[in-house]
Image: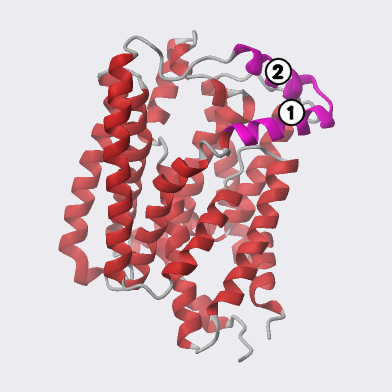
């Protein structure tokens, strides 16, 4: 087996547009995660709660503009990164699977530590498991990746829309998300006033609420097709050969924007129920991710736009480090072992805090990347993957 180590030439092969998209995904994820940092938002619908008009409008704007786009975009980028890594190792005629398994194992360990000891909303663990399944598609042709991705997503979406629409009609008048007051009170007490042990216990309960045998299959069917779409983009050399796909990209950008906009406002135009919420989250989030990918790809053809977007590229190159830092900062601000503001932050105040974090991370990433080639956790992942390989 040949010894393989990432060298300077490989680092020059970085695709700037992909790094920019990582930065945008990270921003979207923080904006959507923020309510879950300072409140038990997983257990209620903000639209059912009393509050100021400003908070209601702010929540609606984030919900419509951002939605689940960040998570969908990250799934596409995971698949893209997988296939790019496969292609580069294949070109060097070395075995891909050992390197990739080491990489995912390192990610899983970081994700497990994050989920158990920092914040229950961790997504690294689930995305890493889904990324492992990509090993079955490593040698698939780009047409196969596209067919599987669009096929799984389309069939699943149609079935879910039919079932949930029927459920919404049968249960007309019911809310999209019920309020679980005892669980809310328990979370407020644990995170706002509890010991580290009680917070740890509550964190486990909240993580299991989000990721269990009832929810993971639906997450897989919603997100894994986007991993395949990312793999398709890598094999098509979407970013590198954009001029060959310019017409298709412009049309896809327009169509995805229309679907994204229509799906995002649907719960506000019609009614908040299980069907419109699903369309908003899954259809709107996916369409929004595709819209951002195509828009950034088209925009990055301009040198001036590349310069403007460079801070987002730096943010994206340190996406893992920045993601973990966001959790550390927010849990310190809101949990009882820190400043203890859990349950005392409004939506507008939460958005202001998120804006400050994003600004500081944009600046910090720019400074760090001007001094070093990798972020701290990115360097750790690189070492785990390539450092002392055979």
Secondary structure at badge 1 equals: loop
For disc 1, the marked residue is 335
Q: Residue at x 60, y 55 (%)?
A: 320
> Which label sits in the foreground, 2 or 1?
2
Residue at image location 48% in from the left, 19% down from the top: 45
Range of the magenta residues?
A: 181-209
Q: Residue at x 36, y 72 (%)?
A: 140
Quote the CA–CA distance across marks 2 and 1.
14 Å
Q: Is residue 375 visible?
A: no
Q: Quadrant of residue 122?
A: top right
Nearer to us in this view, 59 or 386: 386
Question: Dividing the picture into quarters, in which one does residue 360 lie?
Answer: top right
Is residue 369 something that shows in the picture?
A: yes
**Residue situated furthest bottom in the rendering:** 2
State which quarter of the image contains the N terminus: bottom right
Residue under label 2, please give it. 186
Q: Is residue 370 above or below residue 258?
A: below
């Amino acid at each position: 087996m040949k010894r393989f180590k990432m060298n300077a030439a490989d680092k020059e092969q970085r695709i700037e547009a992909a790094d920019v998209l990582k930065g945008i995904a990270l921003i979207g994820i923080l904006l959507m995660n923020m309510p879950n940092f300072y409140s038990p938002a997983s257990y209620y619908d903000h639209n059912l709660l009393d509050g100021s008009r400003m908070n209601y409008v702010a929540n609606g704007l984030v919900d419509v503009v951002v939605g689940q786009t960040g998570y969908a975009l990250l799934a596409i980028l995971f698949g893209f990164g997988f296939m790019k890594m496969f292609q580069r190792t294949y070109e060097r005629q070395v075995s891909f699977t050992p390197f990739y398994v080491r990489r995912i194992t390192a990610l899983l360990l970081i994700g497990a530590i994050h989920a158990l000891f920092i914040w229950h909303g961790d997504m690294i663990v689930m995305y890493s498991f889904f990324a492992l399944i990509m090993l079955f598609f490593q040698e698939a042709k780009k047409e196969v990746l596209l067919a599987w991705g669009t096929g799984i997503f389309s069939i699943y979406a149609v079935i879910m829309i039919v079932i949930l629409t029927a459920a919404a009609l049968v249960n007309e008048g019911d809310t999209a998300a019920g309020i679980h007051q005892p669980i809310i009170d328990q979370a407020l007490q644990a995170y706002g006033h509890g010991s580290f042990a009680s917070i740890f216990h509550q964190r486990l309960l909240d993580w299991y609420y989000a990721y269990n045998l009832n929810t993971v299959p639906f997450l897989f069917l919603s997100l894994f097709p986007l991993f395949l779409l990312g793999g398709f983009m890598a094999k098509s050399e979407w970013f590198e050969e954009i001029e060959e796909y310019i017409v298709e990209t412009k049309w896809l950008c327009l169509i995805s924007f229309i679907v994204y906009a229509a799906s995002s406002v649907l719960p506000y135009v019609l009614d908040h129920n299980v069907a419109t919420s699903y369309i908003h989250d899954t259809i709107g989030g996916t369409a929004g991710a595709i819209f951002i990918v195509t828009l950034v790809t088209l925009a990055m053809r301009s040198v001036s736009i590349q310069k403007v977007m460079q801070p987002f590229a730096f943010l994206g190159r340190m996406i893992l480090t920045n993601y973990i830092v966001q959790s550390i900062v927010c849990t310190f601000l809101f949990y009882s072992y820190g400043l203890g503001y859990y349950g005392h932050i409004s939506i507008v105040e939460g958005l202001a805090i998120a804006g400050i974090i994003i600004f500081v991370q944009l600046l910090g990433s720019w400074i760090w990347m001007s001094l070093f080639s990798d972020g701290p956790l990115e360097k750790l992942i690189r070492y785990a993957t390539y450092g002392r390989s055979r």
